[in-house]
């Protein structure tokens, strides 16, 4: 139950941040990606604020030794660079550039009910399920979250 | 939390006026204005969200991984519940803020619905294969100085820049 509260609290701040930052607007995201056009550097400020705050917040969190609502931190341990990482990131970047949505902003925009957003999120879940289905054939099930 | 946004418009989704051309992407789009303060503040909120999920649940706030985990049939039920709560928080909060009177940024789409579907499949597939998205790799991974995340973020940024360049300027 406590972990549900942790997830909800984090999700609420995440949604508020995505809305305030402007990232729920695909045109703003693609304006950032359009270096050769009318470039809008705002997203660099989102990343700066998010990475700096997370880096500081993680240091505080790790200093405690364990999370409040769980026995241990669940952190990715892989260090190697593999083909899937590069291939997946490339495919993701392609879709990001086409639609102007990455997963967070698409979910944060879902509540406003635009058909574009609903279709994008549904298609995104299909793509995720397809990748997980393929991974089960190629390799044993692994924790795929970053 | 005062949400002062540079643009005061409604959140009625607006579609680009120009007819789709080239790969089906409408080339015309409203010129967006630079919003450094709001974007920086939004980023700080995202960083707080990531901090809470790590400090409370001990988890990386990677939206793609958490959302994809909801579709897992062999996961732990307790994992499923906090993931659902996290996703519900992301989805519900922006409309609730709007109802509460906060001004939301305008939403303008850059691609018609069928193309958004295609983009969604690519984003979903790519983030699962690559093990993360803008949040898991771009924010949390870089904050941990993870080499995999730094490489992944560099690659998807370059792919995003390249894709928009090709769609807008190459044809």
Image (cartoon, coloured by chain):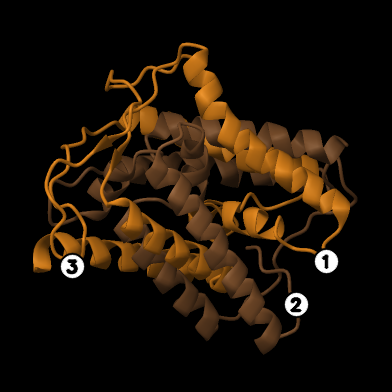
Chain colours: A brown, B orange
Q: CA distance from mark 1 to mark 3?
A: 41 Å
User: Dot 3: what SS?
Assistant: helix
Q: Nearer the viewer, mark 2 or mark 1?
A: 1
Q: What residue is pinned by disc 3?
A: B166
Q: Residue at x 58, y 37 (%)?
A: B90
Q: Nearer the viewer, mark 1 or mark 3?
A: 1
Q: Are marks 2 and 3 on the same chain?
A: no
Residue A98 occupies quadrant: bottom left
Mark 2, secondary structure of its residue: loop
| Front-lying residue, A5 or B16 | B16
Task: Determine whether, in the image, residue A37 is placed left or right of residue A32.
Answer: left
Neighbor class of circle 1 (other Cα within 10 Å; few <14, some 14-19, many 20+) is: few
Which residue position holds label 1?
B74
Q: Quadrant of residue B55?
A: top right
Q: Is residue B19 left or right of residue A3?
A: left
Do discs 1 and 3 share a chain?
Answer: yes
Who's the residue at 52% across and 43% down the image?
A: A107
Residue A73 location (% of width, % of height): 79, 54
* Image location (x, y in percent) of residue B84: 72, 44
Q: Are marks 2 and 1 on the same chain?
A: no
Look at the picture and state if A123 lies above or below A50: below
Q: CA distance from mark 2 to mark 1?
A: 10 Å
**Which percent across, then down, holds residue A65?**
84, 48
Q: Position of residue A135 (x, y in %)?
A: 65, 80
Find out whether the residues at labels 2 and 1 contact each other: C-beta distance under 8 Å: yes
On the picture, is B35 further left or further right than A91? left
**For marks 1 and 3 on the same chain, the one whose residue lies earlier in the sequence:** 1
The chain carrying label 1 is B
Point out the residue furthest to the top here: B101
Residue receiving disc 2: A141
Quadrant, the C terminus of chain A: bottom right
């Amino acid at each position: 139950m406590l972990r549900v509260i942790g997830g909800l609290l984090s999700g609420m701040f995440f949604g508020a941040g995505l809305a305030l930052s402007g990232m729920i607007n695909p045109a703003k995201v693609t304006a950032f990606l359009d270096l050769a056009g009318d470039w809008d550097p705002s997203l660099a400020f989102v990343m700066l604020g998010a990475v700096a705050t997370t880096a500081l917040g993680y240091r505080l969190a790790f200093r405690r030794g364990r999370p409040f609502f769980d026995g241990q931190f669940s952190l990715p341990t892989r260090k190697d660079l593999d083909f899937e990482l590069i291939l997946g990131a490339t495919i993701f970047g392609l879709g990001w550039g086409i639609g102007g949505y990455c997963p967070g902003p698409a979910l944060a925009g879902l509540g406003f009910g635009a058909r574009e957003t609903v279709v994008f999120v549904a298609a995104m879940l299909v793509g995720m399920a397809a990748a997980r289905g393929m991974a089960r054939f190629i390799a044993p099930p692994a924790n795929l979250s970053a | 939390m005062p949400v002062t946004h540079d643009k005061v418009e409604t959140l009625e989704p607006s579609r680009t006026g120009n007819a789709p051309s080239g790969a089906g992407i409408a080339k015309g789009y409203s010129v967006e204005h630079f919003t450094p303060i709001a974007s920086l503040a939004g980023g700080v909120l995202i960083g707080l969200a990531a901090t809470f999920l790590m400090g409370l649940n001990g988890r990386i706030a990677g939206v793609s991984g958490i959302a994809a985990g909801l579709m897992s049939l062999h996961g732990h039920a307790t994992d499923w519940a906090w993931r659902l709560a996290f996703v519900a928080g992301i989805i519900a909060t922006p409309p609730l803020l709007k109802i509460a009177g906060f001004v939301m940024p305008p939403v303008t789409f850059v691609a018609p619905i069928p193309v958004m579907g295609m983009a969604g499949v690519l984003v979903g597939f790519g983030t699962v294969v690559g093990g993360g998205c803008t949040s898991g790799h771009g924010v949390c991974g870089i904050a941990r100085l993870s080499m995999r995340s730094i490489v992944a973020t560099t690659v998807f940024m370059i792919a995003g820049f390249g894709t928009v360049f090709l769609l807008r300027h190459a044809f």
